[in-house]
Image (cartoon, grey):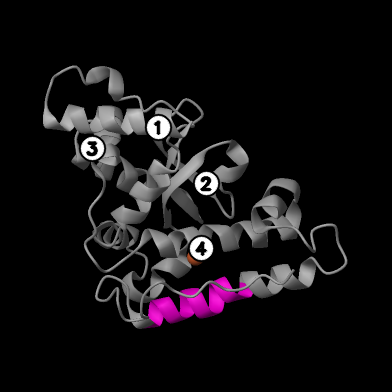
Amino acid sequence: MKHELMKLPYEYDALKPMMSKETLEFHHDKHHQTYVNKLNELIIGTQFEDMSLKDIIKKSDGAIYNNAAQIYNHDFFWNSLNPYNSKMSLELEKAISSNFGLFEDLKSEFISKATTHFGSGWVWLVVDEMGKLKIISTSNADTPLTLGLHPLLVCDVWEHAYYIDYRNARPDYLENFWKLINWKFVSENYSKLRGVFKPNYIDECNENSAECNYIHELVDEERTVS
Ligand code: FE
């Protein structure tokens, strides 16, 4: 099976001035494309030739793992961005409030982890095996998929993601990355986990407000589906 470079979900100049057209052209058309080309070369004649990308990531190591994981991580990164100022779901908003407190606390923990991550890698908002939201960083090509975690959002902190626009000023890149987050995508990733975990904010919702009624409707919906 030949793996394909995903098409960007927006135009190359859609994220400027936070991310320039030149950055997107290099990052997507050169770096991301190279991982796709290398993986396609490496899997010829191996047990990985007809596997899905996720299966390759879970079952391989070395160069095959690195290139497959970098394709997955970059696909996730492009989808984590958008130019539309998208809104998050109430369900995700409640989960963030329950796990981090203020939205600003989530932002400062994410940016702090991304600023201090040593070398190349990725910073993720994930859901852990207990259903809790966490911020983690992974080095080089590593991905939450092999750690039993469910990714919701990712930021690429390899230098190639920001060097053209920001040189070595990673904190400036991160501030602008935050403005581009596709909260609709993050919310959809979270909603796909309904039924896998009991959302950990439900127990806190005892009042008879419109918000609580909405949350209880979500739970009823989940029971109907499962
Ligand atoms: Fe990258």
Identify residue for label 2: 138
Picture residue at 25% right of the left edge, 34% below the top: 94
Mark closest to the chain's N terminus, 4 or 1: 4
What quarter of the picture does the N terminus occupy?
bottom right
Is 168 placed above or below 23 here?
above
Q: Are marks 4 and 3 in contact (CB under 8 Å)?
A: no
Q: Nearer the viewer, mark 1 or mark 3?
A: 1
Identify residue for label 1: 222
**Number of marks in the rendered image:** 4
Identify residue for label 3: 105
Element at label 4: helix
In magenta stretch: residue 74: no
Give the alpha-carbon distance from disc 4 to disc 2, as whole Å. Answer: 13 Å
Give the alpha-carbon distance from disc 4 to disc 3, as whole Å. Answer: 26 Å
| Magenta residues, start to end | 22-34
At label 4, which amino acid type do we have? His
Mark closest to the chain's N terminus, 4 or 2: 4
